[in-house]
Structure formats: structure tokens, C-alpha cells
Amino acid sequence: MIIDGFLNALSNVLSTVISALPAWNAPAFFSTVIGLWTQALAGTSAFAHWIPLPIISFVATAVFAAVGISITTRIVRIVISLFTAGGGSVQ
């Protein structure tokens, strides 16, 4: 109950802060970066016989997912450790 109230209050504060911010449009730089990335990948397609790009991309995705999950787990464990739920040291 206490955690629900805390999370509700936190979400209300966060939504208020986000609603106060102006609308954001991505700069044109991002579209040129995507175009350059597409050109680079198209240029490397001739090397696909020697370099297994689908396997490399799959492994890289799996590694980034594992790192993301481990970081998220660590953050959740830190946040949960802040709430002792009546336990902890008694002095």
C-alpha cells in the first residue's frame, strides 16, 4: 500500500513535469545519420560472403539485451533494498 501510494505520487509528479516541457522534434541530423548508416551497410554487402553480418548482429543484440537486463535488475534490486518492509536492523 505504501509503495503503491509512493509510485502513484511519483507518476503524478513525473507526468506533471513532462506535460510542462515543450514538444520536441528530432533535428534533421538524425535523418542524415540514418542515411549514412544505410549507405555504409549497403557498401558492406559485398563482404557478406566473408563476414557473417546476420550472426554478428544477432550476437550484438543478445549481448546488449543481456547487459540491459542486468543493469535493470541491479537498479530494481537497489530500489527494493530501500524498502525494508519492517525488517532490517533494529536499534
Image (cartoon, helix red, strand yellow):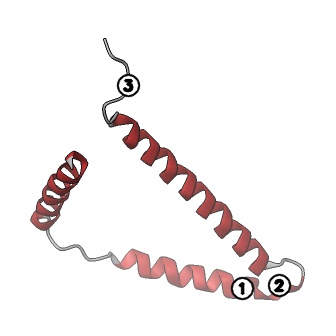
Q: Residue at x 48, y 53 (%)?
A: 72
Residue 10, label in figure: none
Q: Which residue is mark 3?
A: 88
Q: Look at the numbered discs 3 and 1 and tell me whether their residues touch, using CB distance below 8 Å.
A: no
Above-or-below relation of 17 to 37: above
Task: Name which of mark 3 and mark 1 comes first in the sequence.
Answer: 1
Q: In the image, residue 73 lies at what x, y percent?
A: 51, 50
Q: Residue at x 46, y 43 (%)?
A: 77
What separation in Å lies between label 2 and label 3 (alpha carbons)? Answer: 57 Å
Assign the C terminus to one quadrant of the image.
Answer: top left
What separation in Å lies between label 2 and label 1 (alpha carbons)? Answer: 10 Å
Q: Residue at x 44, y 46 (%)?
A: 75
Amino acid type of the residue that numbered disc 2 sits on in the rendered structure: Ala
Q: Residues within 10 Å of mark 3 (few under 14, many from 20)?
A: few
Q: Which residue is mark 2?
A: 48
Residue 43, label in figure: 1
What separation in Å lies between label 3 and label 1 (alpha carbons)? Answer: 59 Å
Q: Residues within 10 Å of mark 1 (few under 14, many from 20)?
A: few
Q: In the image, residue 81 lies at what x, y percent?
A: 40, 36
Above-or-below relation of 85 to 48: above
Q: Is residue 18 left or right of residue 67?
A: left
Task: Name which of mark 2 and mark 1 comes first in the sequence.
Answer: 1
Q: Is residue 70 left or right of residue 41?
A: left
Q: Nearer the viewer, residue 39 or 21?
A: 21
Q: Is residue 62 left or right of residue 88?
A: right
Amino acid type of the residue that numbered disc 1 sits on in the rendered structure: Gly
